[in-house]
Amino acid sequence: MNNESPRIPAHFHKIQFVLAGIILLFVTPLHASVKLKVSASNPSPFQEQVVPVKSYLPKGIGPQDIINAGGLTIGYDIRKGQYYVYKEVVLAPKEMAVYQVEINDIWLISEADLEKQRAYINKLTDRLKNSQYAKSVQKLIGEIDESITIIINHQNENLIEKVSAVDHIAAYELNTETLKKIKEDIDIIESMVMTLSKTGAVVGVSQDQAAQACLAQEAMRYADIKGIALETPQDVRFTIDVQNSSDVDTQNVPLRYYLAQEVGANDILDSAGLNVGFDFEKAVHYLFQDSILLGPGEKKIFDITLRNKWVIDKLYLLTLKVNSDNVALALGSRAGFEKFRQRNDEIQSQLDQLLKAKSFTELTEEHIRTFRNNHQQLKNIEQEIAKLENMVITSNGAGVVTAQARERLCEEKRDQKIIAAAKGPEIIKEFKMAAGTIFKGKSLKTTTTWELIIGIIIFLGFLSSAFYYMQIREQKVVMLDPLTGAFSRAYILERFREELRISQNTGTKCSLLVMDIDKFKSINDTYGHAVGDTILKEFVITIRKGLRATDLVGRYGGDEFLIILPTSNKERAHKIGEGIAKIVQKSVIQIEKQTFKITTSIGTATYPDDSKVPEDVFLKADGAMYQTKRRGGNGVSTA
């Protein structure tokens, strides 16, 4: 799981949720706004300073969503794809400045849009009166109407002025899932209308072919024959532990544990009494408790239960196997069939490997890494199948298998609705393939209707949304190290350059710590990489106990880590390094029945005392670390 200490952005500014205001615009529904508190302080007790304020706004917020910037300037980070507010202020010693930025509440689903959905459905329903689908559509209409009512009620119960920000966002996530189900039901109704709009066969698919069983049914039979169990654990568990590093004093220890990027607020089934928070800059949830009273050396363990988000649907994998076989057979009459057969064999082998993935109930970093690797492999397989399908389309052979080739998402619940709708979604899937031929310069076999145009727009909307969320996921992967939860190498180096620019503009100092784990290679060689990975994770958790909220931790590579200390001179950096070394030396890591005690070697360098060039500062800190190693490790050296 990602684990990252709370970080107040550069120079002590911070951003937090406060109670939202309500604005009434004529007869329109209420529009909630959210106020973000941005504060900046002068850390110096002696001198006046120019302090730069820069706080990133929540992801998804644009200038059009900013009601009042609170006197701050709006900027845009091209690399992050995220807006921020900033300003330089002159502050007296220990003075604090507070700003309020008011933004639109983007965590709401427009009731007007929901009512438009109702109106659109009614128009479609009118076209299905006195048809063979009249009875089936009434059932779907009832489900959609009920779902819309649930969304509206749930949203009104969890407005930002009524509940916490986390609960408000959790309600939005849940309502978004309900909205997806509504869109699936609308797809089915549209498919019924499409069926009635055509005469004879439906765009390259005969009525006999359209009546064939969907891929999910074929996959279920395959699973029965092969004895493949499709059930997977619905939830997973893991533990968070916090320990008092002091052997003599009782202490209040803070805890903040960042969850994996896949986890939403509604996926936290049991937080073991910990509070749930949401980091708007990173767009991830975390568990926290500001103060846990622990006796000398005492450790407290929290058992957490999450909804299982790290599983690939085996039924879906089986539908891909059937689909790939069907597409390969459709290409059998083409030249070079042997090449297509070999490609299909490779796809089948890769899918078989994914089907062998074991289910688990205890969540570990290894499980998450395996899932993400498998998920990436699945995306590659889907792309390979799409290439084969594209050959079917361009060869005008779509009339053989296209309805089946596009019926990928025929899961059990959806399949029941498909049967009731007389195979409606198969026609929608075929329609999407037909739409694909338009962009390839192919002419359709029947006249294009307005339903086809509407469908194309909907389909393109789904594609653009998919690209957007893929981009967000990629940004998260770039920023964080997946094993330790520390910042990635690229990100920590970029932040170091940024901190030095701030120091240059404000005339302050900035220090860098470079450290690694003493004799880590021998631990890896003796006990294996799984133990080594656990030690790396625990090492990061431990060193954060000796840091301030403004300090940044990043993984440079292997067991080498960087810590940026804004506004810290040489003496302060050396003192922090000594504190970290002592905390690491006192820590005990328990892995199964084996106990490990580790130490660290640290080197420090300071801007601008040692150099004004970021690369030189790093090299001098790195050299100082090796001075520590030459003295036997377990200590700090200053450049």
Image (spheres, rainbow, N blue to C red):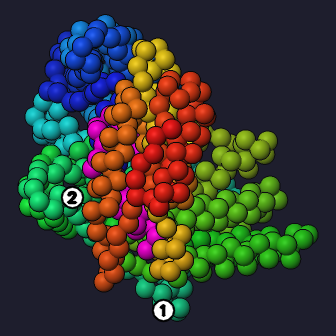
In this view of the protein, can residue 330 be seen by the observer? yes
In this view of the protein, can residue 473 be seen by the observer? no
- Residue pushed farthest front? 631
Residue 166 appears at what percent x and percent y? Answer: 21, 42
Instruction: Give above or below for 465 relative to 612.
Output: below
Residue 529 appears at what percent x and percent y? Answer: 50, 73
SS label for mark 2: loop
SS label for mark 1: loop
From the viewer's side, name the closer residue of 465 and 626.
Answer: 626
From the viewer's side, name the closer residue of 28 and 123.
Answer: 28
Q: Which residues are magenta?
A: 531-553
Q: Which residue is mark 1?
A: 227
State which quarter of the image contains the N terminus.
bottom left
Label 2, residues with CA under 10 Å away: few <14, some 14-19, many ≥20? many
Q: Residue at x 61, y 56 (%)?
A: 430
Query: How far apart are the two marked residues, 2 and 1, measured between alpha carbons?
Result: 51 Å
Q: Residue at x 43, y 28 (%)?
A: 510
Residue 331: quadrant of the picture: bottom right
Label 1, residues with CA under 10 Å away: few <14, some 14-19, many ≥20? few
Q: Residue at x 57, y 45 (%)?
A: 623
> Earlier along the polypeptide chain: callout 2 or callout 1?
1
Magenta span contains residue 164: no
Residue 152 appears at what percent x and percent y? Answer: 20, 39
Q: Amino acid at mark 1?
A: Gly
Label the magenta part by its dominant secondary structure: helix
Q: Which residue is mark 2?
A: 245
From the viewer's side, name the closer residue of 342 and 288.
Answer: 288
Observer-side mark, 2 or 1, equals 2
Q: Amino acid at mark 2?
A: Ser
Q: Is residue 571 left or right of residue 452?
A: left
